[in-house]
Image (spheres, rainbow, N blue to C red):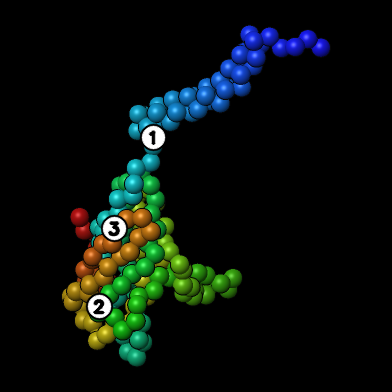
Amino acid sequence: MTPPTPDSRLRTSLTAAGVPVLACGLALGGLGAWTASGRAGSPPHVGVARAYVYQSFGSTPETAAFFTLTNDGGSADRLVRVTSPDTTEPPGLSGHRMTSSNGAYRQPVDSILVPARAGLAMNPHGNDVTVRPRTPWRPGEVVSFTLHFAHGKPLRVNAVVVRPGAEKNRPPRP
């Protein structure tokens, strides 16, 4: 076996160092092109287009609040908590599920996804916020909520009290 020459040692060293450097350069170039094309994710930007809460009836202590959330950001966010000074307990996030015999039930959820460049319209057959009013609410009253997200800033929202079913025939508010 012949001893390595200084030239062969230099070539081996440059090859060993050059491959990772070339790979990093290609990765950075690809990420730069992706960002320049506008395809890189921007932060979530969640807003509320509509908010209402059902009036509770009879001796039922709970009712539901619904929010139409918009997200014109490039990344999804998650609604993780809702607070309100107008409720006896912290409001809870919930989703409605169906049994095999077509019975419906409410199930607590940890968070609700607000997709990027889209949003979410809560409704009685999907996700909602379960609330216990501090005092009986009447149609037309305004209830204050703060929506807390995994990534975005908290949003303060006023929801109007409506009779159950009253919102389904109204056009969306701007």
Look at 52% across and 75% down and name the residue there: 103
Residue 117 can be seen, yes or no? no
Q: Residue 41: percent from the left, percent from the top? A: 38, 41
Q: Position of residue 59 (x, y in %)?
A: 34, 91
From the image, tell me which residue sits under label 2: 85
Crowdedness of circle 3 by 10 Å Cα count: few (<14), some, many (20+)? few
Quarter of the view holding residue 61: bottom left
Residue type at mark 3? Lys
| Marks 2,3: beta carbons within 8 A | no
Image location (x, y in percent) of residue 104: 49, 74
* Mark carried by residue 39: 1
Q: Nearer the viewer, mark 3 or mark 1?
A: 3
For residue 104, which numbered disc appears in the image? Answer: none
Residue at (75%, 11%) from the top-left corner?
3
Q: Is residue 85 visible?
A: yes
Q: Secondary structure at mark 3?
A: loop
Judged left or right of residue 106, residue 7 is right
* Observer-nearest of 35 and 172: 35
Q: Which residue is mark 3?
A: 153
Give the structural element (helix, strand or loop) at label 2: loop
Instruction: Give left or right: position of 138 versus 13.
Output: left
Q: Amino acid at mark 1?
A: Arg
User: Which of 50 and 8 lies nearest the eye of the viewer?
Assistant: 8
Q: Quadrant of the N terminus?
A: top right
Q: Residue at x 37, y 62 (%)?
A: 79
Tell me which label, 2 or 3, sits earlier in the chain. Answer: 2
In this view, 20 is above or below 80: above
Residue 154 at x, y percent in the picture: 28, 62
Q: Which of the marked residues, 3 or 1, is nearer the chain's N terminus? A: 1
> What residue is shown at x 34% (from left), y 46% (from top)?
43
Mark 2 to mark 3 CA distance (whole Å): 19 Å
